[in-house]
Amino acid sequence: MDLLTVDQKSCNQDGLCAAVCPIGLIDFNQGSFPQAIDDADELCVRCGHCLAVCPSGSLSHRDLDVAGCSPVRQELQLGAGQCEQFLKGRRSIRVYKDKPVSRETFERVLDIARYAPSGHNSQGVHWLVIGQRQELQALSALVAEWMRLMLEKSPDFALSLHLDKTLARWEGGEDVILRGAPSVVVAHAEKNNRMAPVSCTIGLTYLELAATGLGLGCCWAGYFNAAASTFAKMQQVLALPEGHQAFGAMMVGYPKFQYKRLPERRPPEVSWRLA
């Protein structure tokens, strides 16, 4: 089967598929039907742009099921004001209800997060979802052990991150590592994948924003990820697939409190080079 197939009965020959293809794999001349270039199969990144833009649904891709491509519903599109409030209203949640997050809820959030952009549409992000209280406590203890090691081996670095104060609070019974979150999500990928750090960061950002719509709150687990990335004992316990590395972690749970205002941020620092 050819990589691309065009229904010539319904195709309106507008050339949109060729115009949006990021790799330039579709030939189109006015008055003719679009067709794939000779080496399109090898070069195509399966991004689906060509299918998504076709107004008549006339294009088929061998490796992408056009029937499974949900239509964009205009009534669900965010207006400018809604989008602005949604993004400005994001808060890092550090106080959670004592309520677990179900697997079904995580499946829905991750189903959205998988649509995050990734370099060359590599989609190389893998996920580890941890929601067992005892395991989270054990992992927090390993993070604390990593902090002690950093204070001993790299004191300047550790003190610059105030690990001494953080560790003292944790040892005093205050959970400043995972903040009592009922779940932690780890984004991991092949350590030799040059696109992995950015792809995982963007994927976690999508996860954080998607979680908001389901009543969840999130906070980036920086100490957790630092230990997961560098501390052999913690890496052994996490047991990621061979050759994988953690590139980010997120606390996830139901917020105990609701925020009512949008605190100001510093104005953006911008250098303009417009026409």
Image (tube, rainbow, N blue to C red):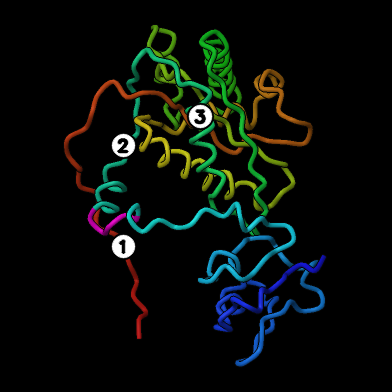
Query: Disc 3 or 1, which lies upstream in sequence?
Result: 3
Residue at 42 percent across and 27 percent down: it is 162
**Is 98 positioned to the left or the right of 222 in the image?**
left
Do callouts 2 and 1 mark residues in contact (Cβ within 8 Å)? no
**Highlighted magenta segment, given as a residue range:** 77-81
The location of residue 146, given as percent across then percent down, is: 58, 20
The image quarter in which residue 214 lies: top left
The image quarter in which residue 132 lies: top right
Q: Is residue 252 above or below residue 114?
A: above
Residue at 79 percent across and 67 percent down: it is 41
Residue at 31 percent across and 36 percent down: it is 91
Magenta stretch, overall SS: loop
Mark 2 lies on residue: 91
Q: Secondary structure at mark 2?
A: loop
Q: Nearer the viewer, mark 3 or mark 1?
A: 3
Q: How many marks?
A: 3
Q: Is residue 168 magenta?
A: no
The circle on residue 269 is 1
Q: Is residue 168 above or below residue 7?
A: above
Residue type at tag 3: Phe
The quarter of the image holding the N terminus is bottom right
Query: Disc 3 or 2, which lies upstream in sequence?
Result: 2
The location of residue 124, given as percent across then percent down, is: 67, 46
Q: Nearer the viewer, mark 2 or mark 1?
A: 2
